[in-house]
Image (cartoon, grey):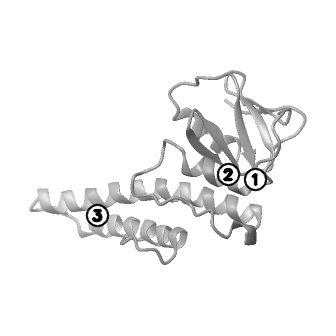
């Protein structure tokens, strides 16, 4: 499956609001992968916002993205409210602040919101890997039989810890 475009392509990355769930796509292929995780579509068309703030029309039935939308471009505040009010966020995720957004460019706000959403995915994977390591070390007295297994899992955990710190910066989260 591939996404088709009418007239022209949006400026990737894009953010789409699908029945309250906000998904992000770095490319058409990445957007298809995100859409495959959605169980069902309740409407015929949805709004897609590209990195310039332009609102596009997405049809999940035909897998078509079109600039033929009657909605005006989204403002920074509208974009922040959309992402903060989504249904597919974790309880531990802090909302993006709407204070002092006039000092930030639209692209900066857009990329920070996308990074915040991507960090949630990294956080889930990090906790799965961390739980696996702890489970294996506590459940099996003789695990790991090969120290290289533990070393490989520790390297994977360190990689995701570094990525999370890069996204969250100097936050209060402990990794």
Q: Dot 1: few (<14), some (14–19), or many (≥20) neighbours within 10 Å?
A: few
Left or right: 10 in relation to 160: right
Circle 2 is placed at which residue position?
A: 79
Residue 125 locus on image (x, y percent): 40, 55
For the C terminus, which image quadrant?
bottom left
Circle 1 is placed at which residue position?
A: 75
N-terminal of the two: label 2 or label 3? 2
Spatial distance from mark 3 to mark 1, Cα to Cα? 49 Å
As drawn, the residue found furthest toward the front would be 99
Pointer 1 and pointer 2: residues touching (CB < 8 Å)?
yes
Q: Secondary structure at mark 1?
A: loop
Quarter of the figure with residue 60: top right
Q: Looking at the image, which residue is at 45% across and 58% down?
A: 93
Quarter of the figure with residue 76: bottom right
Circle 3 is placed at which residue position?
A: 149
Left or right: 139 in relation to 28: left
Residue 30 locus on image (x, y percent): 63, 44
């Amino acid at each position: 499956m591939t996404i088709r475009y009418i007239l022209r392509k949006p400026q990737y990355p894009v953010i789409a609001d699908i029945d309250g769930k906000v998904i992000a796509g770095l490319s058409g292929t990445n957007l298809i992968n995100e859409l495959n995780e959605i169980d069902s579509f309740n409407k015929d068309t949805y709004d897609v916002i590209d990195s310039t703030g332009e609102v596009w029309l997405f049809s999940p039935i035909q897998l078509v993205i079109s600039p033929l939308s009657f909605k005006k471009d989204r403002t920074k505040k509208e974009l922040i409210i959309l992402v903060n009010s989504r249904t597919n966020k974790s309880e531990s995720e802090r909302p993006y602040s709407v204070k002092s957004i006039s000092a930030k460019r639209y692209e900066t706000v857009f990329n920070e919101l996308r990074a915040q959403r991507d960090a949630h995915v990294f956080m889930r994977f990090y906790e799965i890997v961390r739980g696996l390591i702890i489970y294996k070390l506590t459940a099996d007295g003789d695990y790991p039989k090969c120290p290289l297994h533990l070393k490989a899992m520790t390297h994977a955990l360190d990689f995701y810890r570094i990525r999370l710190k890069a996204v969250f910066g100097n936050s209060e989260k402990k990794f």
